[in-house]
Image (spheres, rainbow, N blue to C red):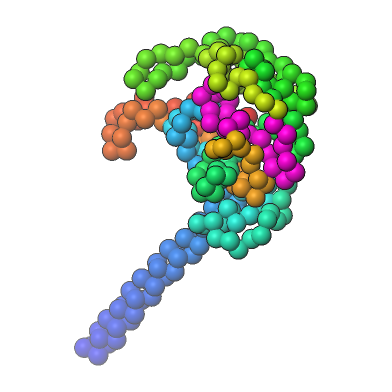
Amino acid sequence: MDSSNTKAGAKTVRKKGGGIGDTVLTIVYAGLIAIFVRTFAYEPFNIPSGSMLPTLLIGDYLFVSKFSYGYSRFSLPFGLPLIEGRILGGTPERGDVAVFKLPSDNSTDYIKRIIGLPGDKIQVIGGILNINGVPVKRRRIGEYTDHDTYGNPVTFTHYIETLPGGREHDIIERSDEGQLDNTPVYEVPAGHYFAMGDNRDNSLDSRVLNHVGFVPAENLVGRADVLFFSSNGRARLWEVWKWPVAIRFSRMFNGVH
């Protein structure tokens, strides 16, 4: 009886050891799968500023499809220089909302709308976007109210802008006399793109050549596809009782247009 119990106990110990090993392997496999998905399929991003209002709000979380534009070294963790140029890539379409690495440092993530394609001539005149010498149609649909850093309401004019080809998106303007409402002509070089924020008077974008400028194709990370979560920031993670009023349920699982 004693011998039998000892053997049974030994078997139990061995099974426990195997169970721990299986758990560790499961964790490792899950981590590798997560890295693979994040690198080659979808990567989550959050919106920290209001430069893409009213399309994207501060506190939005979205998935960016990495495969939409193919892959470059910026698709890899830490920007490892293992890919030269871009491979397996499609090209952005005018109007896409894209994430890219800021050209001036190749590390900061920016999200803007692709307005200019290689070879395009872009200019803003009196607040009106011009592409290849043709004013882009915008239609006023009302007012849009946001709040400044002190909580004071700020009113914008809300427009629908229609790009060549018929693609529409929302933009907002404080006025048509801002610093970036009258610009020189920007001629987009081959292999580069011109990106602008939808919050036209509060966006540091390709209009500012010494900071953003033209975006090299290599710097594209992916296309913003879907919102999966949104919070107005009024509840900390542990303040569960505030979640119902902090989470913007109506924005969850919406496409990015």
| Residue under the point 21% across and 88% down | 2
Q: In this view, does 5 lie above or below 116?
A: below
Magenta region, residue range: 186-208
Q: In this view, does 73 lie above or below 162?
A: below
The x, y position of residue 119, in whole percent, is: 77, 37
- 25 displayed left or right of 112: left
- 143 displayed left or right of 85: left
Q: Is residue 153 magenta?
A: no
Please state which of residues 239 and 192 is positioned toward the viewer in this rendering.
Answer: 192
**Residue extending furthest toward the left:** 2
* Picture quarter with the N terminus: bottom left
| Residue under the point 33% across and 28% down | 234
* Picture quarter with the C terminus: top right
Figure disc tally = 0
Q: Main secondary structure of the magenta part?
A: loop
Q: Is residue 91 above or below residue 248?
A: below
